[in-house]
Image (cartoon, rainbow, N blue to C red):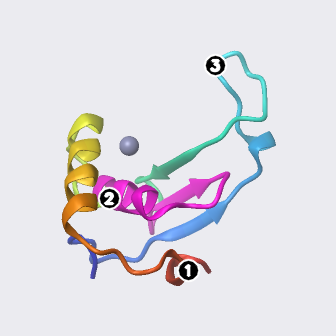
């Protein structure tokens, strides 16, 4: 159990060509979680850093937090917690 997340989480790597900007042009970078899926899915176009994973797990653990609250807590944890190597998160 990490950061109070008790459920499983799926990681799915997607192509940047599946991600469009606000004008509909493909080729964008994305790391984001979809909480409405079961289990929640973290979609990512690039290799996830430990900070990315903590950030997205906080969204899952605290769905009512604002983006700013998640960013602040990610920074706080980054200063105080030694994270396990990210390779254990790669499926
Ligand atoms: Zn976020």
38 w.r.t. 85: above or below: above
Residue 43 inside the magenta-drawn segment: yes
Instruction: Tell me where residue 88 appears, x and y as whole percent.
Output: 51, 84
For mark 3, does the 10 Å Cα neighbourhood hold few (<14), some (14 to 19), or many (20 or more) residues? few
Of labels 1 and 3, earlier in sequence is 3
Circle 3/circle 2 CB separation < 8 Å: no
The residue that disc 2 covers is 60
Q: Is residue 9 left or right of residue 65?
A: right
For mark 1, does the 10 Å Cα neighbourhood hold few (<14), some (14 to 19), or many (20 or more) residues? few
Q: How many marks?
A: 3
Instruction: State the quadrant of the N terminus.
Output: bottom left
The picture quadrant where one finds residue 51 is bottom left
Furthest residue to the top? Answer: 23
Of labels 2 and 1, earlier in sequence is 2
Label at residue 87:
1
- Residue occupying image coordinates x 67% and y 51%: 45
**Magenta residue span:** 38-59
Which SS class for mark 1?
helix
Furthest residue to the front? Answer: 79
Instruction: Tell me where residue 10 appears, x and y as whole percent.
Output: 52, 70
The residue that disc 3 covers is 22
61 w.r.t. 84: above or below: above
Separation of marks 3 and 2 at Cα, in angstroms: 25 Å
- Residue occupying image coordinates x 32% and y 58%: 60
Separation of marks 2 and 1 at Cα, in angstroms: 20 Å
């Amino acid at each position: 159990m990490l950061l109070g997340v008790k459920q499983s989480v799926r990681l799915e790597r997607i192509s940047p060509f599946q991600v469009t900007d606000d004008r509909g042009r493909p080729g964008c970078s994305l790391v984001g979680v979809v909480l409405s899926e079961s289990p929640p899915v973290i979609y990512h176009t690039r290799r996830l850093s430990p900070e990315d994973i903590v950030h997205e797990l906080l969204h899952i653990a605290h769905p009512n937090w604002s983006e700013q609250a998640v960013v602040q807590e990610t920074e706080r944890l980054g200063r105080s917690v030694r994270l396990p190597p990210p390779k254990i998160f790669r499926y």
